Image: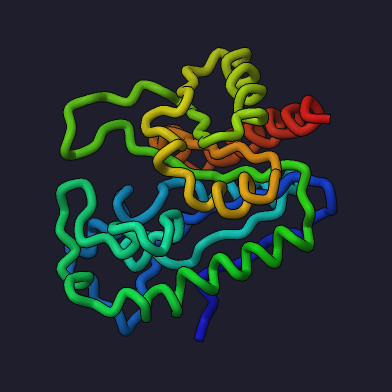
Amino acid sequence: MSLPYRQIGTPTRGGIVCVSDHASNRVPDDIDLGIDPALMNEHIAIDIGVEGVAEAMAAEHSIPAHLATISRLVVDLHREEVHPGVVPPESDGHLVPGNAGINIEARLDRFHRPYHAGLAQWLDHADPKLIISLHSFTPKLETSDEARPWEVALLYNQDDRAARHAIRLFEDLGLVVGDNEPYSGRQLNATMNRHAEAHGRYYCALEVRQDLITAHEDQLRWASIVADVMGRVALALD
C-alpha cells in the first residue's frame, strides 16, 4: 500500500522545512467519490499550485518538503481526527456522495494516521528552526460573493512569533498580506497545532492566492519569494 505522503530533499538540523497537507488531488482506484472528475482540478480537491512551489523550494532553495499524496476530499489531513469535515461530505457547495456512510475509522487508519506519524518522525529527525505550512486559497468561494484580495496570508493560533516577522517582510515587498485571513488559524490550524505549537516549534502557516501560483513560472517566482522571506524570518527568530 502506497504512503499518503512523499518527502523530497534532505532536512538539515536547525534548518527550514515545508509541509503541505493539500498538495495532491489523487484518489486511490478503490475509492469512488461520486463527483464530476473536473472538480478534482479545483480548489475543493487540491491546494492549486503548492506542489510546484514546494518542489521548487526543495530543488532550488534547499528547503525539503513533506507533501500529501491524496486529495483532501478522500480525507482532510489538515483537520483533527474528530473534526466533522475530516472526511468531507461536501465542499464549497458540492456534495461528495462517495463519502456518505463510509467507515471513517478505516480512512483515518489508511491515510490520516500514517501521514501524521510520518510527519512527526520526519520533524523529530530534522529538528527544524522553522516550519512552513504551505497552502493556497481561491480568490472567491463559489458559495460567497466576497472577494479575497490578499496575495499572501499568515495564519496562526496561539504562537504568532514567526508570523509577525513574515507579515512585515511580505508587506515590505509591496504585497497585500492577510493577518489570519481569509480564515483564522485559531479555527483552522490543525497540523501546526499538533506538530509545531504542541512542541514549541516556530512555524509560518502560509496561504498564497492560487491564481498567483497556477503557472509554472509563477511557482518558481513564489518559491524564491517564500524562501527568501522565510530565511529572513528564521534569522530574526535567533
Front in this rendered view, residue 183 or 24: 183
- Colour convention: rainbow
Q: Is residue 74 left or right of residue 227?
A: left
Q: Residue 96, image x and y in percent?
A: 19, 63
Residue 9 lies, with reference to residue 156, above or below; the image says below
Q: Residue at x 49, y 66 (%)?
A: 69
Depth check: give the residue in front, 36 or 115. Answer: 115
- The image quarter containing residue 90 is bottom left
Residue 141, percent from left and from top: 24, 37
Q: Nearer the viewer, residue 74 or 219?
A: 74
The reply to whether residue 59 is in sight is no
Q: Residue at x 27, y 60 (%)?
A: 88
- Residue 22: x and y, percent? 45, 55
| 68 displayed left or right of 182 | right
Q: How many marks?
A: 0
- Report the quarter where the C terminus lies: top right
Visible in this render: residue 206? yes
Left/right placement of residue 145 relative to residue 68 reads left
Residue at left 55%, top 34%? 158
192 shown above or below 162: below
Residue at 28 percent of width and 79 percent of height: 103
How far across and down, in percent of the image, does residue 220 sit? 60, 40
What is the quadrant of residue 74 in the picture?
bottom left
